Image: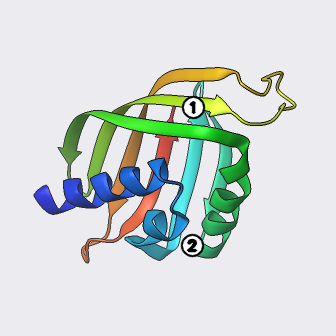
Amino acid sequence: MVQRENIIKAYVEAYNNKDVDGMLHDMAEGVVFENVSGGTVTLSIKGRNDLRAQAEQVLPVFTERRQTIRAFRHEGDQAAIDIDYHAVVAIDLPNGLKKGDTLALTGQSVFTFSAEGKIVKLTDIS
């Protein structure tokens, strides 16, 4: 459990620092990423290369972004974190958010690990 928590903490730190290489460091080659909002999967990506492309594409969208871990839970091959999310929008977005708008959300991220300790699935839930 401690090893998984350290991997997750390193991922969140890399995310907060916009360090895509650091975010992908402990991910399996065939990692699956899903974003779930309101019970609906809004984004699904398979593979480190596609996840890298997506992560790099959204970097300029926010002038700042920060996930803060509030709690850890472990069950089987999964570890979940409750997070507070804060971000400032850098550009006008099609969904109506404007440059300078602030986002403050709570959510959960569920990490599924392989026997070798690599992240094979990451699900962000808001």
Image position of 116 (left or right of 50): left
Element class at badge 2: helix
Mark pair 1, 2: CA separation = 24 Å
Image position of 60 (left or right of 9): right
Report which residue position mark 1 lands on.
87
**Residue type (three-letter) at the residue carrying disc 2:** Arg
Image position of 124 (left or right of 116): right
Residue plotted at (62% across, 67% down): 52
Residue plotted at (53% across, 21% down): 104
Residue plotted at (66% across, 40% down): 62
Q: Residue 116 bears which disc, if any?
A: none
Q: Residue 48 bears which disc, if any?
A: 2
Q: Residues within 10 Å of mark 2 (few under 14, many from 20)?
A: some
Residue plotted at (21% across, 53% down): 5
Where does residue 50 sit, x and y in percent of width and height? 67, 69
Element class at badge 1: strand
In the rendered view, would you say 121 is above or below 110? below
Where does residue 16 sit, x and y in percent of width and height? 46, 47
The quarter of the picture where residue 108 lies is top left
Name the outermost residue toward the left. Answer: 2
- Pick the front one: 54 or 45: 54
Q: Residues within 10 Å of mark 1 (few under 14, many from 20)?
A: some
The quarter of the picture where residue 10 lies is bottom left
Name the outermost residue toward the right. Answer: 94
The quarter of the picture where residue 112 lies is bottom left
